[in-house]
Image: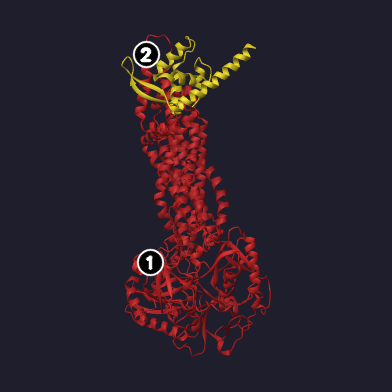
Amino acid sequence: MGESADRQSGVLPGTLDMLVLKALARKAMHGYDVAEFILSRSGDLLRVEEGALYPALHRLELRGLLESEWGVSSNNRRAKFYSLTAAGRKRLALESTQWASLSMAIARVMEA
Amino acid sequence: MFTNLRLRWRSLWKRRQLDRDLKDEIAFHLAMRQGSTRQFGNPTLIRENLREMWTFHILESLWHDLRYGVRMLWKSPAFTLVAILSLAIGIGANTAIFSLVDAILLKSLPVREPASLRLVLWAGEPRVPLNNSSGYTRKNEAGQLVHSSFSYSMYRMFAEQASQFSDLAGFARSQVTVVAGESHYANAFFVTGNMFNTLGVPPLAGREIAPSDDRADAEPVAVISYAYWERHFGLDRSAINRQITVNGRGLRIVGITPQSFRGLENGSGFDLCLPLSLVSGFGPKFYAIEKPTAWWVQIVGRLRAGVDDRQAKASLDLLMERASAPFASVPKKGEPWRAVLESGAAGVQLMREQASRPLLILAGAVALVLLIACANIANLLLARASARRREIAVRLTIGASRWRLIGQLLTESILLAGIGAGLGLLFAGPMARGILAMAAGNRPISIQVGLNDRTLLFTLIAGLFTALLFGLAPAIRATRVDLSPSLKDGSAGSLGRGPQFGLSRFLVIGQVALSTVLLAGAGLFVRTLANLSTIDPGFNAHQVLIFAADGSRSGYEGGKLAGLYERIRARVAAIPGVQAVTLSSVPLIADSEDNDDVTVPGYVPPAGKPASANTMLTSSRFHRILGIPMLLGRELEDGDGPNSRKVAIVNETFARTYMAGSSPIGRIFYFGGPQATRKPEDAFEVVGVCKDAKYDSLKHVVPPTAYLSFLQKPDWMREATFEIRTELPGSALANEIRKEVAGIDRNVPVADMRTQEEQIRQSLGLERLFAGLMGAFGLCASVLAAIGLYGLLAYTVTRRTPEIGIRLALGAERRSVQWLVLRDVLWMVAIGMAIGIPVALALTSLIRKTLFGVTPDDPISFAGAAVLMALAAIAAAWIPARRAARVDPIKALRYE
């Protein structure tokens, strides 16, 4: 299962999974809301393509980091809601710290 | 990772739900996004990508390919049928031969850790009088002459002192007469008390022979084999503890061995297993426990872990040296005794030498058949591929990958091979057993031939290999399509004379070549059988019924034994319908012979080649009853009894070889070499000369033979074969004969009743097998080649219809058009034969030893093969050629 889907998105390679996990950290959402969440929180900068988003969601589900449930959306349609599993939370925590130190390090280099 | 597999596995079974979910999810997203100008991309592609994540992609496409393959095969039933049948024959025959190879040459004994078992043998110049030996002597792989048997005292010494072995067990075998209900012969397997422990074979029921049974004062007990239990006790458990009479003495059955265990000798099995200590009462007289000159114990041992063969051999050599001490007085000559260790994993391989050559020949033949079948199917596939050109071109244009298509075409091939292999398996078992039964003739062969994991694996590999062989090239060819012309839906004209056409011709030529090889081989074997069948045995085998009886194992010996046989002869002769009865010490044409050195006064044998003769002890009028013509003198008469002068009838060869120059009548000879002591009463006087008659085999040149009266040499007599001249069939007399013999002594069984003609036919079992099988294979091959030719020609004619139309329109004669097609065929056949005949010549020289009366380059066989092949080819070409000649030029040209 290729990570190559990341390349299609507007996000930094390797970070899509982390963003998706972060989006789902607060509550369960369906795919559209995940994309909207990332878009709005990034100040309309990170536009996640569907062609990358859904493979990422399914990949994380297959890895046991997410679980899914079919429910009814706010407009009364059948929709698939994703939520974090325990493993998913752990992973998010790990990736957050790694990202924090990495971005700080990069920032220092770039400011020098 | 585990969740991943579990989830994917689950989705494999819920395909529909998965499809629906994926669709819904995407649809929901699209609905949410309505009005937005954002691009979604290709929803179907996304869905496909997601689907792939959830499923075992390869498995899925395999499943698709399989379903597609079944549909395609179903759509062309004629092709499928021909392909599957020829594969079933090809793979089935290969599996059958392999299962024989497996059973005879490869299979290990069904014992614990067979790899650490060793057979202990010895090599060197025998310095003991080994006429007291039993077992076997043969050349091993190193070209060394090895002997199988030791004296009992040597066995004891080895067992006690050879510390490299955790166990050494001894064994010997002989035939015994059993009375349990009816009397019959049985194979006895004598073993030391530790045998079953050494091998690690647990009893099926009751117990095994234990060390406590192997003592002189122990109760006589026996363990029976599963086969014997089935045959004589109908698998009844009450057989255990039953008392039976063996060679006239009582014995108790204490256990039954498992079905898989058939003793240590591959091919011969056993009925009763007795402790070795019982050999003195139940075995042949020369199996003597205490005599150091009686060499009859064979030894099998289990090496201790970590001991290698060299160490074990070194210590046995030392013991051999010590064992030779008692024979120090015998003059030494030649090599000293040396121990020889051979692997015991497969037991004693008595059949290996006899069987490996025929098996090799058959394996070669069936491999050729399979190869021809492959070529045939490859050709049919090529023809189909051109019919499917458009389909394939379309699929390639809309983006299917070439590998995917090759995979799909190969799946079809594997499917075909799989079905063919499955069908082949059905008849492989019966075929293997049939071959074995035919080759064995009337010798019972105890071998379990059947499907096991090894033969199944072989079939699987053969099937896959076959599929690749016939499927790969056509698949690669089929997918190498020049897209544009193929899509423009070809009239026949668009299929140019491509390279594919060359491959077809090449395959057909190959088929013709291989078929020629098989047909030539078949011709040689058929001629061999014909030569053997028309050979004059030198006696009249017609209307002769024979049976065997052995009183020597029921307590008779010497004069009493002769008396018993004479009484049986007289009683059988009195049965209504019996014209005459005689008896002999050896059955005729049964591959057994008695041979002795002779000394003929006046004849000086060349150095190193002592005079010897086959001997046959017979009752009076043997020659007249069997129709062996007398040339000089008289035959054996009633008066030639124990107390009268010893007389002999010799055959022509004997007279010519040893008594040339003067009339043999009245001359004398002695048995034994020149050093043998002889007394006047040992002299045999020649009273008659008969024509040469075949003795042990139709194939052998008749050796010098002497016929003696069994009454005058009763100590040489053991089993007797009775020859009955009668017009009645054996079935009509069998009961009567049994009754009469039982009336004399019910402990003497009647065995091996058959007609002399049956005996001769059975002696030709291998030749009949070869002629039959090779003939069948040759015919199969030429039919397959004819089908291949037909397919290719039919296709060519279709392709060339416009060209033929033009020729006809321009005034060509129909005859010359026909010739056009035939010429093509004859070319291919000629090239095929030009390749096939030299190959056949090279191969048939390998089977020289198996032939009789024909040379491996026999012109009749080769010409026959060529003619048959040419006829098959012309028959195959006939219909296409006629169709070509009937092409209507108007119609043909209208297509253009």
Q: B824 or B359: nearer the eye?
A: B359
The chain in red: B
Subunit ID for the residue under disc 1 = B
Residue located at (64% from left, 70% from top): B319
Task: Give the numbered dot on residue B243.
Answer: none
The hue in which chain A appears in the rendered picture of the protein: yellow
User: What subunit carries mark 2?
Assistant: B
Going from N to C along the chain, the mark reached first, 2 or 1, is 2
Q: What is the number of callouts on the image?
A: 2
Q: Is residue B608 left or right of residue B796?
A: right
Amino acid carrying label 2: it is Met
Q: Which residue is mark 1?
A: B229
Whether residue B386 sits left or right of residue B147 in the image: it is: left
SS label for mark 1 = helix
Task: Read off the residue under disc 2.
Answer: B32
Could you tell me residue B181's position as x and y percent? 34, 74
Whole-angstrom CA distance, mark 2 to mark 1, is 81 Å
Q: Regarding mark 2 in the picture, which secondary structure is present there? A: helix
Q: Are marks 2 and 1 on the same chain?
A: yes
